[in-house]
């Protein structure tokens, strides 16, 4: 559990957003946030003529933070 908290703390604004949703036990909003990020990656990968590699990498890191929050919710509901 400490590792999950460390991921959230090191992630800046998205970590604060995820932490808020976790404290509210709002899995639906976390799922929607993850879906939005995945769509954004798909849209960026479809772009031609510009290098979106660093942006895609940052969004992938945000997805890891969101999934960490979802895992914390799953862990809380299985106890």
Image: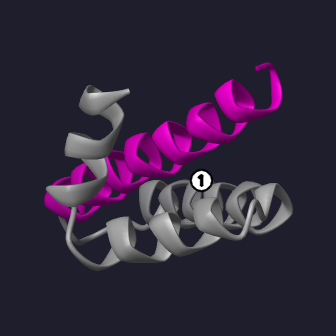
Q: Quadrant of the C terminus?
A: top right
Above or below, 57 relative to 52? above
**The residue tagged with tag 1: helix, strand or loop?**
helix
Q: Residue at x 50, y 65 (%)?
A: 18
Q: Residue at x 80, y 20 (%)?
A: 78
- Frontmost residue, 57 versus 11: 11
- Frontmost residue, 14 versus 60: 14
- In terms of image quadrants, where is residue 74? top right
- In terms of image quadrants, where is residue 26? bottom right
Give the percent coordinates (x, y) of residue 39.
Answer: 64, 61
Q: Is residue 75 left or right of residue 7?
A: right
Q: Residue furthest front?
A: 79
**Prevailing SS of the magenta stretch:** helix
Give the percent coordinates (x, y) of residue 30.
Answer: 68, 60
Q: Residues within 10 Å of mark 1 (few under 14, many from 20)?
A: some
Residue at which label 1 appears: 38
The residues colored magenta run 52-79
Above or below, 26 relative to 53? below
Q: Residue at x 49, y 57 (%)?
A: 41
């Amino acid at each position: 559990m400490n590792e999950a908290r460390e991921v959230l703390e090191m992630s800046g604004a998205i970590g604060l957003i995820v932490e808020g949703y976790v404290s509210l036990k709002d899995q639906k909003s976390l799922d929607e946030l993850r879906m939005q990020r995945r769509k954004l990656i798909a849209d960026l990968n479809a772009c031609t003529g510009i290098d979106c590699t660093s942006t895609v990498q940052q969004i992938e890191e945000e997805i890891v933070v969101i999934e960490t929050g979802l895992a914390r919710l799953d862990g809380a509901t299985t106890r």
